[in-house]
Image: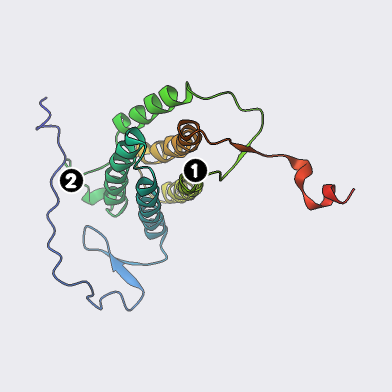
Amino acid sequence: MSAEENAFEQPRVAINRVYTRRGDDGQTSLAGGQRIRKDHARIEAYGTVDELNSFVGLARESARDLPELWQILGRVQHELFNLGSILATMPEDVHPKQARITLAECEQLEREIDRMNAELAPLRSFVLPGGSRLNAELHICRTVCRRAERLCVALAAITPLDESAVKYLNRLSDALFVWSRWASHRMGIEETLWEPNQAASQALK
C-alpha cells in the first residue's frame, strides 16, 4: 500500500464563526453530530488532550535552541490533534481514513526515548522539575499527559476505545520525562534531585 493510500483524510472544516451559542446549555456536539454533556468522560478526555497540546506548544517555543526536540514536539502536536479527533468521535462514526493514533506513533516515541536516554547518566534519585523554563514546562506536559491517560482509561471502561490511544499517552509521558532530562543535559544544566531531608521538618533538627 502506498503512502498516499495509507494517508489520513485531510480536514474538512470551515470555521466562519467563533461562537454559535449552541453550547450555552452545557452540551456540545461530537464529530458525528451527537449532543453530549460537557462534563461527559469523552469530553474530559479530549479536552485534556487539547490542554496537553497547548502546553506542548509552550514547551516547543522554549525549545527553539534544541532543533531536534523542537521538531519532535511539533510532530507530537499533530499527533495529539489526531488523538483528539478520534476521541471526539463515537466508535460507530469512525471513518476508516479518519486521523487517529496508531502503533507507529507509539513505536516512534519508543525509539526516541531509547536514543535520547542513552545520552543520560543513570538516576540515583527522583528529579524535581526545574533548572530551566523548558525543563519545568516539559514536566508540566508530563503530568497533564498522565491525567489525559487516566481519563482515557476511564473512558475505555464505559465505551470501546482503541488501545493505541492509552498506549500512546503512556509512552508520551515517559518521553516527556526523558526529554526534560535530555534538554537539561544538552543545555549543561544540573538536575535537581529529590532529597527527603531538605524538608522543613528535617531542617529543624
Q: Residue at x 48, y 48 (%)?
A: 133
Q: Is residue 130 left or right of residue 160?
A: right
- Give the amino acid type for the residue marked by disc 1 in the picture: Asn
Q: Residues within 10 Å of mark 1 (few under 14, many from 20)?
A: many
Quarter of the picture containing the N terminus is top left
- Local secondary structure at mark 2: loop
Whether 18 is drawn above or below 128: the answer is below
Is 170 on the left or on the right of 15, as rendered?
right
Circle 2 sits on which residue? 95
Q: Residue at x 12, y 29 (%)?
A: 3
Image point (55%, 43%), residue name? 131
Quadrant of the image occupied by residue 113: top left
Q: Nearer the viewer, residue 191 or 15?
A: 191
Location of residue 85 in the rendering, given as x and y in whole percent from the top left corner = 26, 50
Instruction: Report the residue marked by disc 1.
Output: 135
Residue type beneath disc 2: His
Q: Residue furthest right?
A: 205
Going from the N terminus, do you reach mark 1 or mark 2 first? 2
SS type, badge 1: helix
Looking at the image, residue 147 lies above or below residue 25: above
